[in-house]
Image (spheres, rainbow, N blue to C red):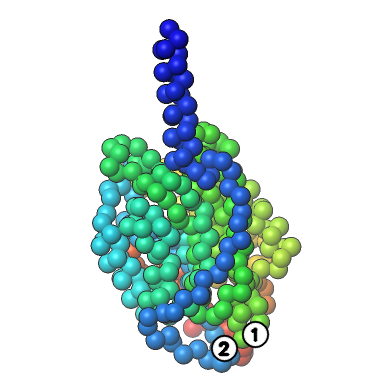
Amino acid sequence: MKMTALIFLILILGFVGLVSWMSYPWSLGYSKKPVEVKVVEPKVEIETLEEAPSVIKVLTWNLGFLYGKGSEGPGYLPRTKEFYEERLQGLVTQIREWGPDIIAFQEIDFDSSRSGGIDQAEYVAIHAGYPYIAEGVSWDAHYIPFPYWPLSRNFGHMKSGGAVLSRFPIKSQALELLAKPAANPWWYNLFYLHRYFQKVTIDINGKDFSLVNLHLEAFDKIDRAEQTKLLSKKISAEGIDFVTGDFNMVPDVAAKKRNFPESEDDYDSDQSYGVMMKAGMEEVIPEEIYGKDETLFFTFPSWRPNRRLDYIFFKKGLKMMRAEVLPSALSDHLPLRASFQLSGPKFNPYQQ
């Protein structure tokens, strides 16, 4: 009997130890460490910047780690490292064609087994001509057991999050990891990613501009509303210039908020958008423009867009020239690009 109890105890302790190791560092509480800005030497000729550029282009894009179509959930099948290298080459080609000055990526891998252990942010920076990189790790675990079975399909080692790439010097960055949904089982949250605010300060023409890159909660609208309230306080307290990212919310004027094809997503009674519209910032696609033909601004899913989840907000007083959703099949989201005029007369880009 004693031997049986001992074996049982050993098995329990072994299981606890295994789970702790797999989910580390999240399982033991993640202590914030200073996050340094990387400076790299691009392998391509960097587009010559004006000494004092009058216009800057900002692009936001949830990459879905470049897996493509749905960035698969339960239907995930592992891909080779060569697959991701090819996707990265395609991404570099598109980025160079679109020419953004600042890029805010979400769901980008820094060193994950599922994407061949490639630092995707650094790869794009080096091959597309962006000397400055800020990486914000929001998902870090020794082993993610998803999809659950068979084991050969598990994500494995995970290091992922948000990244800001810039042609202008990034002077600093700060990462704020948000609480995981309390509605999730505790064991699920051990392996669940953090949502986050990644704030960077960028020197443009000798003037500091602050940008928050974020990824908000997708599956719990109460939690998401609380995150936008926290963000609104941050905007008020810190005077943010740009807020970009995957908000996982739809505009209040959206014609459809539930019953999407192959989706259980429900945005009815979601307060997130309303909170953001009261945060004292402007949005690059105003409601009156969005309402005329919302299909022009859908960002998800990329293969058959039916809603808008991705946004760029900017500080009142800045001059927005043009905003557009760009075509791509590299992710389950489409990228959003906006141009801002730093000097010269203000004009309405929609008066045409």
Q: Is residue 219 above or below residue 351?
A: above
> From what the image shows, is residue 60 above or below residue 161?
below
Residue highlighted by disc 2: 54
Residue at the far top: name it.
1
**Is residue 285 depicted above or below 110 in this figure?**
below
Find disc 1 in the rendering and name its residue: 206
Picture quadrant where residue 149 is located = top left
Residue at x 29% of width, y 65% of height: 85
* Kind of element beneath mark 1: loop
Is residue 315 found left or right of 328 in the rendered image?
A: right
Point 45% across, 54% down: residue: 159
**Mark on residue 197?**
none
Residue type at mark 1 is Gly
Question: Which amino acid lies under the numbered mark 2 shown in the image of this protein?
Answer: Ser
Give the label, 2 or 1, closer to the camera. 1
Q: Nearer the viewer, residue 18 or 226?
A: 18
Q: Earlier in the sequence, mark 2 or mark 1?
A: 2
Picture coordinates of residue 60, whole percent (x, y): 48, 67
Q: Could you tell me which residue is drawn at 61 percent across and 90 percent down? A: 344
Q: How many marks?
A: 2
The spot of residue 205 in percent (x, y) is 61, 86
* Residue 88 visible in the snapshot: yes
Q: Secondary structure at mark 2?
A: loop
Please report contact status of discs 2 and 1: CB closer than 8 Å, yes or no.
Answer: no
Q: Nearer the viewer, residue 83 or 307?
A: 83
